Image (cartoon, helix red, strand yellow):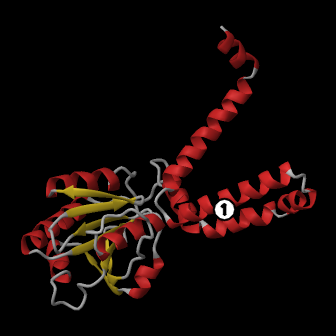
Amino acid sequence: MTVLLIIRDHWRWVVEIGILTCSLYYCWKLFRGTGGARVLAGLAILLASITLISVLLQLNVITAILQSFSTFFLLGLIVIFQPELRRILAEVGSRHLVSTTHQQTEVIESVVGAIEYLQSQRFGALIAFEREVSYEAGHITGTRVDSEVSTDLLSTIFYPKTPLHDGGVIIRRNRLVTAAAIFPLTQAEGLQRTLGLRHRAALGLSEESDAVVVVLSEETGTISVAHGGELIRPLNVDQLRARLTELLQQDQPSKRDS
């Protein structure tokens, strides 16, 4: 009864605590393992230490400075965590009601078919499905293709002796728009040492955008999917098809088709 009385008399506190708890947990889940998480932890420890010292020792000048610079501090956080914030907003904006991206089943089948062939030949591959957030640096560094997606085209691109096999390809709105693109490498800690540049590039792109990235290891033949800063592996071709369908076709069909 005592707990019920406390909740009845202070229900606003309970709601606020619940909202803050959920918000902090969600932010921690999104930021963990990224370069921004380390910066955030360092800033939090530094500010908490300065604030605690200024309060205990009644250092009014320092307290006033901290309060006056709160606006600049928030702007600094926006700049520092720009990649993470962009990914968060992309996830919010890519829900069912506002999504405009839809990957056709035949595109997924073409990718799965290419991965299956390349795996049998022990060739590597890096394929990014671009969604709401475009990584323009990849298009700038890569070679423009702008072609229909097909198993033969992907298999040819990632053949080791072709000029475009280095880097990744980008699929946008059901078309293969760029090949030999350079993706950002993840700065996350605690990764397995066996992960190569393709895996780190896939993770890096998935951290800075809402892209879904397929990785095929040239050394082990392992299939992986990177999304939202997480690497899902190992997968077989059927699991790859199911995962891509789950991630890409959860959006509402778009009437746009370039």
Q: Which residue is mark 1?
A: 43
Q: Nearer the viewer, residue 58 or 101?
A: 58
Q: Residue furthest top?
A: 1
Residue type, label 1: Leu
Q: Position of residue 252 (x, y in %)?
A: 40, 51
In which quadrant is the N terminus drawn? top right
**Which quadrant of the figure has residue 15?**
top right
Q: Nearer the viewer, residue 138 or 257?
A: 138
- Choose between 228 and 54: the one closer to the eye: 54
Identity of the residue drawn at 39% across and 52% down: 251
Q: Position of residue 106 (x, y in %)?
A: 21, 62
Q: Residues within 10 Å of mark 1 (few under 14, many from 20)?
A: few
Relative to 131, is 153 on the left or the right? Answer: left
Q: Is residue 13 left or right of residue 236?
A: right
Extreme residue toward the left, this view:
120
Image check: 11 left or right of 154? right
Residue 249, percent from left and from top? 32, 53
Q: Is residue 168 left or right of residue 220?
A: right
Residue at image location 66% in from the left, 65% down from the top: 78
Q: Give the quadrant of the C terminus.
A: bottom left
